[in-house]
Amino acid sequence: MADRAHSGKSLESDDTGRLWQRLAGRRYVAWAVFFFGSLLLAPDPTGLLPIVTALGLIVLFEGVVRVLRWRGR
């Protein structure tokens, strides 16, 4: 660990770079989990609330991926 600190490369930036790549690679799996999870956790007879909940979670997920990508550069 001391070698990385002296090499000028931050351990955080390496982990962040790999994390956003893993998250982006599993994007559609995460979307499906958000959608089906919201169907289970936010039951609504109209079906609108689970969709809005899933879309909100997807927007947050994509925002986190973009921030991690930006920090990883």
Image (cartoon, grey):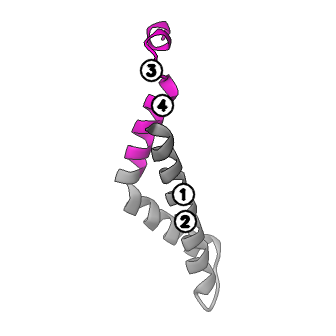
Q: Earlier in the sequence, mark 4 or mark 1?
A: 4
Q: Disc 2, disc 1: CB below 8 Å?
A: yes
User: Gap between marks 4 and 1, in whole Å?
Assistant: 18 Å
* Residue 32: quadrant of the picture: bottom left
Return the mark for residue 59. 2
- Tell me the element at label 1: helix
Q: Amino acid at mark 2?
A: Val
Q: In the rendered view, tell whether residue 68 sits above or below residue 29.
A: above
Among the two numbered marks 3 and 1 on one chain, the one whose residue lies closer to the N terminus: 3
Q: CA distance from mark 2 to mark 1?
A: 6 Å
Mark 2 and mark 3 lie on one chain; the one further toward the N terminus is: 3
* Image coordinates for residue 14, horizontal then vertical, percent: 43, 29
Label 2 to label 3, Cα distance in Å?
Answer: 31 Å
* Residue assigned mark 4: 13
Label 4 near label 3: C-beta < 8 Å? yes
From which residue to which does the magenta span run?
1-23
**Number of the front mark, 2 or 4:** 4
Image position, residue 13 (x, y; %): 48, 31
Label 3, on which residue?
A: 9
Q: Nearer the viewer, residue 19 or 31?
A: 19
Q: Residues within 10 Å of mark 1 (few under 14, many from 20)?
A: few
Side (left or right) of 17 relative to 64: left
Give the amino acid at mark 3.
Lys
Q: Which residue is mark 1?
A: 63
Q: Residues within 10 Å of mark 3 (few under 14, many from 20)?
A: few
